[in-house]
């Protein structure tokens, strides 16, 4: 079934079409949700809420861009709402307005598989995790993210640079450990 | 450059996925099913709310009319047997205590009914006619000043007795003293049965002090409560000088007749891929282009054109009540006539045509067609419908102290369409048809608009109204919504500020 037809059927309330759409995008979207949370259960909660929004707001999809990107945007928004709503995330999201910009231009190579990289991002403190996902992965501008998180723009920049540095340090540590492991193996 | 790192991460992340557990879809499906039911329930709840509101308004109105009635009738006499006893017994009592004398300066015997009646007849013979029924009699309020006097004294309704009663109005500003002790002392043997709503008061007058007229002097008044028809207890309670139960000040309320007229159209908002824009509905033939039989039948291209803008006229009744100086709530009933036009092509009404119409791939089981029209530009059909509507509005007054008020009204309404003949454009099959099965007879609407209220309470306003639901069932595309823009006038019928 073509995507346009699939959307039309979903809008007509066809449950099988909705399931088809879900099956097509659920895996990728759970990956997105997973990056924003600390547990798979939370990610599945977000996925569920997000798909309900998708089906109830599908008529708002104008067809200008890709449906996948539109659904991803809904998932990201749902994830942010979830984080701002639940205390275990909300507490850690409260950051001081420190507008210091530790800037790093390092671009280390990534010698690990995607799953490990995702786990490294998830290991960041919640505020860094969210900010890095929004700016670094989703590609939102600082201004957009500052609005989304109701944050000062300078604070956001500072948060992002810290998150980036922390992730790079973790990557370095990880690659050093790998090198040591390889060296030890040669002995 | 920072971007290199980000790009690498981004590429990796966009290929990352995790297979969700099977429960997730189950829960999504459950929520979607529940939402569908909830939509139906919300409709019923709104309807129930409107019915309750309407009932409440009617009940209140009925109640306020009865209260108003009590307020407006100055004097009500409970024409009971017990009052007759009072009439009989007061004259001697008054004589004994030397405060009231009959006009002819003749002592009245307690047993003399006729003479007792003569003293009672200041308010009408019937009042003391000795009837045993409990019919309330309205006194001709010829002596309005009497009423005003007792109103000042916080005496709700009064039966005057004795010849000195007329003097009460001239005696004016002297205070009313309970005559309980004296009357009890002189009449307790003679008043075996009185209404406990009845009490006695002595009204000393200036006339008594200044005039030698024996018919003047103090008058005796019998104060009765407004509710004279309550069952009478068997014993007399002399201490009860009862005042009218205070009715709390009521807010302003009013009934209006409303008349309105304006434009009506059915409008589609937005579109999605592959379908023609709802506002123009052009290119609808694409929807059936895949059916070879249809393509063969059509020798030229048909388009469904947008429904034209029509008109609405309405009349109704509206009840409005003040919640505060700035806020008002109103509800009512109105009947609207709606009409617009739709360009159509050739029509198919015969059984053969309908059978041919099946080739047009109409597979939706809910649609039953009596006739349908080819889309096109050949003719103009007129759609028409009647609508009964129950609106509930909340109004905000911007300048409550001004004589001419400016308001903003907004609210919800439920409407039933009946006797309607409305073409349903269906771009899925490129058709226009009448179908009761697909047409939505009940719609919920929201409305908003400014209004001006003149010092004479007439209102003039502008109202924008749009339906929440679609003209046809939800699965029909395009989704057309009702949209009305009207100007209206509300003509006040009655209602007042009561304190």
Image (tube, rainbow, N blue to C red):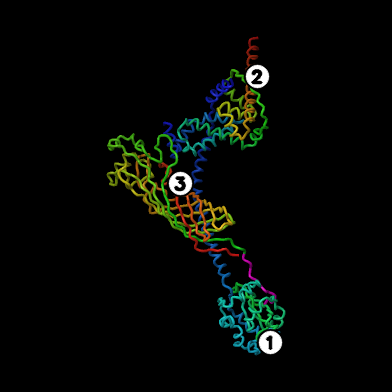
Q: Quadrant of the C terminus of chain B?
A: bottom right
Residue B361 located left or right of residue B218: left
**Above or below — where is B335 with respect to A177?**
below
Check residue B245 in the rendering and tell me which mark sits there, or answer none: none
Residue B168: image location, x then y, percent: 64, 79
Q: Residue at x 65, y 35 (%)?
A: A88
> Mark 2 packing: few (<14 Cα in 10 Å), some, or many (20+)?
few
One can see residue B413 in this view: yes
Residue B249: image location, x then y, percent: 61, 63
Check residue A173 in the rendering and tell me which mark sits there, or answer none: 2
Provide the chain ID for the residue under circle 3: B
**Is disc 3 placed on a helix, strand or loop?**
strand
Q: Main secondary structure of the magenta part?
A: loop
Q: Is residue B375 magenta?
A: no
Q: Which residue is mark 3?
A: B469
**Is disc 1 placed on a helix, strand or loop?**
loop
> Between marks 2 and 1, how big is the CA–CA gap?
123 Å
> Between marks 3 and 2, how big is the CA–CA gap?
59 Å
Q: Earlier in the sequence, mark 1 or mark 3?
A: 1
On the same chain, marks 1 and 3? The answer is yes
Furthest-top residue in view?
Answer: A187
> Mark 1 packing: few (<14 Cα in 10 Å), some, or many (20+)?
few
Residue B463 located left or right of residue A156: left
Nearer the observer: mark 1 or 3; the answer is: 1
Front residue of B67/B439: it is B67
**Is disc 2 placed on a helix, strand or loop?**
helix
Front residue of B127/B134: it is B127
One can see residue B134 in this view: no
Residue A29: image location, x then y, percent: 53, 30
Q: Which residue is mark 1?
A: B212
């Amino acid at each position: 079934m073509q995507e346009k037809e699939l959307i039309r059927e979903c809008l007509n309330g066809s449950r099988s079409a909705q399931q088809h759409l879900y099956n097509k995008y659920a895996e990728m979207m759970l990956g997105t949700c997973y990056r924003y949370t600390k547990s798979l259960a939370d990610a599945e909660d977000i996925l569920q809420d997000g798909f309900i929004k998708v089906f109830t707001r599908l008529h708002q999809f104008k067809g200008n861009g890709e449906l996948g990107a539109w659904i991803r945007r809904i998932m990201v928004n749902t994830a942010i709402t979830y984080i701002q709503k639940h205390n275990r995330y909300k507490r850690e999201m409260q950051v001081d307005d420190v507008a210091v910009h530790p800037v790093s231009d390092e671009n280390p190579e990534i010698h690990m598989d995607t799953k490990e990289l995702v786990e490294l991002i998830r290991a960041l403190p919640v505020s860094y995790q969210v900010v890095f996902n929004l700016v670094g992965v989703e590609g939102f501008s600082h201004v957009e993210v500052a609005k989304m998180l109701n944050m000062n723009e300078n604070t956001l920049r500072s948060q992002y640079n810290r998150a980036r540095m922390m992730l790079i340090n973790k990557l370095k540590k990880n690659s050093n450990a790998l090198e040591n492991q390889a060296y030890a193996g040669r002995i | 450059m920072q971007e290199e790192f980000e790009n690498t991460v981004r590429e990796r992340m966009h290929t990352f996925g995790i297979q969700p557990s099977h429960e997730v879809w189950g829960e999504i499906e459950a929520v979607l099913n529940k939402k569908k039911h909830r939509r139906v329930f919300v409709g019923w709840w709104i309807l129930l709310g409107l019915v309750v509101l309407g009932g409440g308004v009617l009940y209140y109105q009925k109640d306020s009319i009865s209260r108003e009635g009590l307020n407006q009738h100055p004097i009500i006499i409970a024409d009971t047997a017990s009052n007759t006893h009072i009439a009989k017994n007061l004259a001697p009592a008054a004589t004994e205590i030397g405060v009231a004398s009959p006009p002819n300066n003749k002592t009245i015997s307690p047993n003399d009914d006729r003479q007792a009646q003569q003293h009672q007849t200041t308010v009408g013979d019937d009042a003391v006619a000795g009837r045993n029924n409990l019919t309330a009699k309205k006194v001709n309020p010829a002596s309005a000043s009497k009423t005003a006097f007792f109103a000042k004294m916080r005496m709700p309704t009064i039966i005057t007795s004795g010849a000195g009663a007329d003097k009460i109005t001239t005696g004016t500003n002297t205070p009313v003293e309970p005559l309980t002790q004296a009357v009890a002392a002189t009449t307790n043997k003679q008043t075996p049965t009185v209404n406990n709503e009845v009490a006695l008061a002595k009204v000393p007058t200036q006339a008594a002090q200044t005039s030698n007229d024996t018919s003047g002097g103090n008058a005796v008044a019998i104060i009765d409560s407004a509710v004279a028809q309550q069952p009478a207890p068997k014993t007399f309670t002399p201490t009860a000088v009862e005042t009218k139960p205070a009715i709390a000040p009521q807010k302003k309320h009013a009934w209006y007749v409303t008349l309105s007229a304006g434009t009506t159209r059915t409008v589609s908002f937005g579109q999605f891929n592959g379908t023609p824009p709802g506002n123009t509905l052009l290119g609808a033939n694409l929807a059936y282009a895949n059916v070879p039989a249809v393509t063969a039948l059509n020798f030229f291209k048909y388009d469904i054109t947008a429904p034209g803008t029509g008109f609405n006229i309405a009349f109704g009744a509206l009840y409005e009540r003040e919640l505060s100086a700035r806020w008002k709530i109103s509800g009512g009933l109105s009947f609207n006539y709606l009409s617009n036009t739709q360009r159509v092509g050739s029509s198919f009404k015969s059984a053969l045509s309908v059978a041919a119409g099946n080739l047009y791939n109409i597979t939706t089981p809910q649609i039953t067609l009596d006739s349908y029209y080819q889309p096109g530009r050949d003719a103009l059909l007129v759609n028409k419908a009647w609508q009964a509507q129950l609106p509930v509005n909340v109004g905000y007054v911007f300048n409550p102290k001004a004589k001419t008020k400016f308001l903003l009204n907004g609210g919800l309404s439920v409407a039933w369409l009946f006797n309607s003949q409305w073409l349903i454009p269906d771009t899925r099959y490129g058709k226009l048809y009448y179908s009761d099965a697909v047409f939505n007879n009940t719609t919920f609407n929201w409305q908003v608009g400014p209004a001006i209220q003149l010092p004479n309470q007439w209102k003039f306003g502008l109202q924008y109204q749009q339906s929440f639901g679609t003209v046809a069932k939800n699965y029909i595309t395009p989704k057309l919504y009702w949209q009305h823009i009207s100007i209206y006038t509300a003509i006040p019928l009655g209602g007042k500020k009561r304190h």
